[in-house]
Image (tube, rainbow, N blue to C red):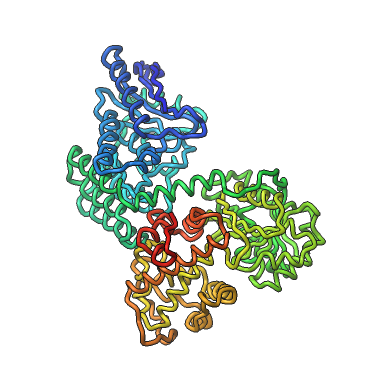
């Protein structure tokens, strides 16, 4: 890590003033593949650079200090590898104190300070900018946030004090809680400006030049920057209360970090700066050695690593994909077609059995393109080109020239095999053929093909545009080229691919269904539905079990249960209550948002026994079932190791980082050794 210091004469203002000279600090990792981070070396370099800047102020009359980044990165925040290595409370406290001491120098400088946010600014990176007197931001920025609560920490270098006082408590709760707990959602440059985090926005092409010109007008008094009035107590309290409701809905009290963050945001209204920074130091000290943070950093590192370089991708050249075919035009198939069209930007053809279904599918895709345009994700020229690049037909021969064809028809083996028999003779010999099956045997499907070596499982999760996981399923006959092509396509789709061996329901659905199976058994035994819903709160899952069941679809859940019960009748069952739920049309049993409450739809629907379980008993049963099934998945070689399981559950079903996905949690609560006699890690 290096922080360059140079002096720049600020441009003459429109009013004719020469503002003077600025000392500009540039944060540079020295490697374009790695972002600048604030570990001990980075903070040390920044500290030394500020020494130089302050000397220039004293000795050479420099009138301002600025800070910016390189390679579309301002600063990616704290060095998480260094955080993961912290061993005791005092070391953890020292990390917080060092960050505060260095970053607050921007606020305490003898001259105005300016942050020119040219790119990604997360955590300590955003906090660095918040300590400055003024902030400009590039219109191309897509990564402004405080993700600490998502990882198991608090924004501990001034963020919980500075952000609510600058932009208001509502914005602070949104950035530090709502966005962080929504899988680290971030703000764009325009959104940061609108929120009051940035004072001015400039286009990326000449961002630094415009920022320097703007800074000069501020120093000359020709531009005034208005700040929002401080929020009153009622507004502040309402924002924090909203944040607590969000935290309860997302983690159900199972993780300490969001609540410590909210405590700090609440205290920021009345604390003075020194008192508050000391409180942030203590929160960082406590959380820095917590098991939730260790699990969170483990899972975060895994997800990042698999996203950059998936495990198991063959080292051969993939086929070039210049056109895609989608067999089916239902909701899942249409979502896939939109994703392929948007990310690959190649022609996409949908086919289905009726012209009406084809027209509906193509219409869905074109509407999706317009939605992307409305959100500013694509230009109008791109939207026109993409809309013209999607077509449909009732004839599968329309797929004859496609390089990559994926089927997403009804989840029934005979239907899929019929489609594949008809499809194969129509395709080019070098085309790769994929299935989006969620639980059926890819090997059995391939048995009807003359060239099964080009067939691969390519399992997406619903909603396709949101969930980043793809299970890439290899059969005994899948060749390296087909597999490499699937991985290459997945990467271009901005998905994380995990290699799995063909086995019933693969990884995510197999493990999730084992968990849901135990939940349904508890209902069958007579456990009150609300007790069952809250029994897994400790896992911090984004949805309670029957909320998730309704979201996925009871009929889909039933189908996967039937598949797994047929494959593993010793462990999986098909509950009559689950069948009743499907036959009744799958009504919502609990409220879809906010605190979980019964809707009344379960009355007269479920039939329970007279041996109800306590919440604690349901949780223990689920823990043991998860430990048992994951060990079986590993022993069968479905995936290479527990890390693959954790990546799958984090990205495929939203298991939180603070459980590490799941295997570190099962180790921590003793389920691994209780059931299998050994830990996963």
Task: Residue 109: give x, y in percent of width and height.
Answer: 26, 25
Quarter of the image for the N terminus: give it: top left
Left or right: 497 as drawn, with respect to 23: right
Left or right: 551 as drawn, with respect to 61: right
Task: Residue 663: give x, y in percent of width and height.
Answer: 43, 58
Q: Nearer the viewer, residue 321 or 230?
A: 321
* 433 is higher (above) or lower (below) than 66: below
Q: Quadrant of residue 68?
A: top left
Quarter of the image for the C terminus: give it: bottom left
Residue at 27 percent across and 23 percent down: it is: 111
Left or right: 480 as drawn, with respect to 74: right
Residue at 44 percent across and 65 percent down: it is: 676
Task: Residue 451: give x, y in percent of width and height.
Answer: 78, 59
Q: Quadrant of residue 229?
A: top left
Residue 511 in view here: yes
Task: Residue 594: give x, y in percent of width and height.
Answer: 35, 65
């Amino acid at each position: 890590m290096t922080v360059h210091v140079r002096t720049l004469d600020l441009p003459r203002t429109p009013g004719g003033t020469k503002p003077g000279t600025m000392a500009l600090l540039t944060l540079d990792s020295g490697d374009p593949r790695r972002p600048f981070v604030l570990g001990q070396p980075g903070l040390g370099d920044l500290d030394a650079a500020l020494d130089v800047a302050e000397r220039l102020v004293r000795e050479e009359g420099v009138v301002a200090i600025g800070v910016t980044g390189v390679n579309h990165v301002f600063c990616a925040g704290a060095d998480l590898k260094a955080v993961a290595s912290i061993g005791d409370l005092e070391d953890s406290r020292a990390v917080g104190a060092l960050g505060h001491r260095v970053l607050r120098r921007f606020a305490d400088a003898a001259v105005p300070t300016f942050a020119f946010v040219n790119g990604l600014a997360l955590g300590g990176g955003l906090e660095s900018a918040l300590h400055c007197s003024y902030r400009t931001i590039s219109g191309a920025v897509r990564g402004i946030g405080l993700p600490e609560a998502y990882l198991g920490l608090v924004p501990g270098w001034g963020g919980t004090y500075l952000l609510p006082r600058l932009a208001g408590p509502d914005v602070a709760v949104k950035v530090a809680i709502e966005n962080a707990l929504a899988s680290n959602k971030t703000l764009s440059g325009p959104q940061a400006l609108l929120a009051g985090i940035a004072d001015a926005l400039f286009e990326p092409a000449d961002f630094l030049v415009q920022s320097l010109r703007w800074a000069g007008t501020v120093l000359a008094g020709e531009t005034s920057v208005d700040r929002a009035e401080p929020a009153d107590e009622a507004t502040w309290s309402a924002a924090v209360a909203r944040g607590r409701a969000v935290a309860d809905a997302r983690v159900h009290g199972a993780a300490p970090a969001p609540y410590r963050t909210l405590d700090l945001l609440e205290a920021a209204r009345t604390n003075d700066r020194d008192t508050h920074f000391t409180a942030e130091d203590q929160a960082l000290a406590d959380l820095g050695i917590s098991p939730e943070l260790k699990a969170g950093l483990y899972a975060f590192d895994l997800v990042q690593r698999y996203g950059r370089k998936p495990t198991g991708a063959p080292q051969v050249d993939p086929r070039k994909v210049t056109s895609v075919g989608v067999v089916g035009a239902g909701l899942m198939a249409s979502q896939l077609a939109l994703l392929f069209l948007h990310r690959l930007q190649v022609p996409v053809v949908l086919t289905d059995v009726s012209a009406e279904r084809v027209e509906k599918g193509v219409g869905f895709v074109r509407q999706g393109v317009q939605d992307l345009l409305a959100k500013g994700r694509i230009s109008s020229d791109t939207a026109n080109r993409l809309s013209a690049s999607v077509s449909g037909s009732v004839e599968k021969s329309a797929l004859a020239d496609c390089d990559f064809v994926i089927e997403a028809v009804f989840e029934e083996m005979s239907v899929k095999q019929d489609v594949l028999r008809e499809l194969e003779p129509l395709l080019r010999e070098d085309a790769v053929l994929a299935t989006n099956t969620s639980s059926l045997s890819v090997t059995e499907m391939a048995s009807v093909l003359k060239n099964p070596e080009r067939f691969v499982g390519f399992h997406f999760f619903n909603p396709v545009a949101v969930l980043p996981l793809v299970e890439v399923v290899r059969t005994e006959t899948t060749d390296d080229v087909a597999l490499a092509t699937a991985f290459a396509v997945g990467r271009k789709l901005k998905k994380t691919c995990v290699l799995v061996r063909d086995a019933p329901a693969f990884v995510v659905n197999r493990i999730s269904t084992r968990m849901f199976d135990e939940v349904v058994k508890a209902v069958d035994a007579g456990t009150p539905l609300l007790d069952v819903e809250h029994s897994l709160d400790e896992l911090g899952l984004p949805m309670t079990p029957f909320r998730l069941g309704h979201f996925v679809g009871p009929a889909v859940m039933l189908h996967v249960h039937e598949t797994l019960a047929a494959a593993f009748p010793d462990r999986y069952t098909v509950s009559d209550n689950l069948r009743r739920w499907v036959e009744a049309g799958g009504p919502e049993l609990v409220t879809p948002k906010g605190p979980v409450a019964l809707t009344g739809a379960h009355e007269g629907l479920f039939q329970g026994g007279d041996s109800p379980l306590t919440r604690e008993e349901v949780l223990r049963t689920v823990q043991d079932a998860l430990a048992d099934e994951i060990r079986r998945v590993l022993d069968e070689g479905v995936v290479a190791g527990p890390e693959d399981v954790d990546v799958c559950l984090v990205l495929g079903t939203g298991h939180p980082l603070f459980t590490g996905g799941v295997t570190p949690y099962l180790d921590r609560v003793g389920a691994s050794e209780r059931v299998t006699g050994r830990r996963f890690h």
